[in-house]
Image: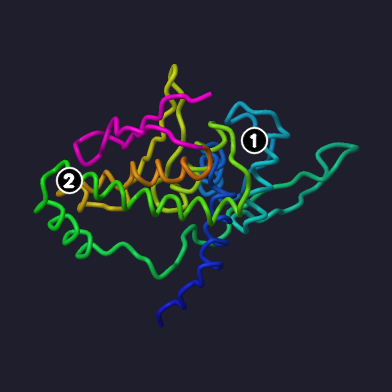
Amino acid sequence: MAAEPFSPDGFTSAVSAITSAFGDPTRRRIYLLAHERPEGITASEVAEAFGVHANVARHHLDKLAAGGYLEVRTGKHTGAAGRPSKRYVATATPVSVEHPVRRDDLILSLLGRALELLPREQAEAMAEEVGIEYGAAMAASLSGGDAHRSFRSALHAVADALTAHGFAAHTEARGDVVSIVAEHCPFGGAAVVSPVICAVDRGMVKGMLSALYGDTCPETERSRALGDDRCVTAVPVSL
């Protein structure tokens, strides 16, 4: 039986929940570590594994537990005094969002072919404009009408939103440029056949940043469609 489609509010809530749980790259790595250990992990083990303070480790674990991705199990006291030790065990909760807008290879292939009929510069401009409009809509649904954020806060919000949409994105700072790095491309093989589709990604970043912060000039620096190991959209630092 097909899953019932989400309402717009339900989809936004689901995206926000996944973003909250997995938007931080360290938290994603902690989740993967928990999955590798059937017996679960403790905050002290996470702190040692990732070189963070125990309180930071506990914060990440509690975020994952609040989303239903980890189960908290209380063990015996580790000493004569103090709180009982907590172990965080991965649950069977799937990390996905089932919604009516699913990637369809045929539609993407047809889109790529249609864009190829246009001069490359015109096709890229059209694809980027589509991305800008969608990115602005994403930002509006996530911001809830909040005032504009700082530059770096907006960049992190964009990476989180892209991650929730299947891009596995995070930010990296290098000199006077901050990059949004996507480890996965939800467009799949269609982007390899028609790299112009990558302009949609750039447009999404530009549209979200415009709504959350202000005008910026993102540029595609690397692309899996062109043979790179990941997609990188560079955004010059704006103070």
Across and down, in percent, residue 109 comes to 17, 59
In magenta stretch: residue 233: yes
Q: Which residue is mark 2?
A: 122
Q: Amino acid at mark 1?
A: Glu
Q: Amino acid at mark 2?
A: Gln
Quarter of image, res 195: top left
Across and down, in percent, residue 139 comes to 50, 50
In magenta stretch: residue 231: yes
Q: Tell me how far mark 2 sits from mark 1, CA to CA.
A: 53 Å
The quadrant the N terminus occupies is bottom left
Secondary structure type for disc 1 = helix
Q: Which residues are magenta?
A: 214-239
Q: Which residue is mark 1?
A: 45
Tell me whether circle 2 and circle 1 mark residues in contact (CB < 8 Å).
no
- How many marks are shown on the rendered structure? 2
Q: Is residue 107 above or below residue 200?
A: below
Name the residue: 47% across, 40% down.
209
Secondary structure type for disc 2 = helix
Name the residue: 53% across, 43% down.
212
Q: Hey, which residue is sitting farthest right in the picture?
A: 81
Dot 2, how many residues are within 10 Å of its Cα: few (below 14), some (14-19), or many (20+)? few
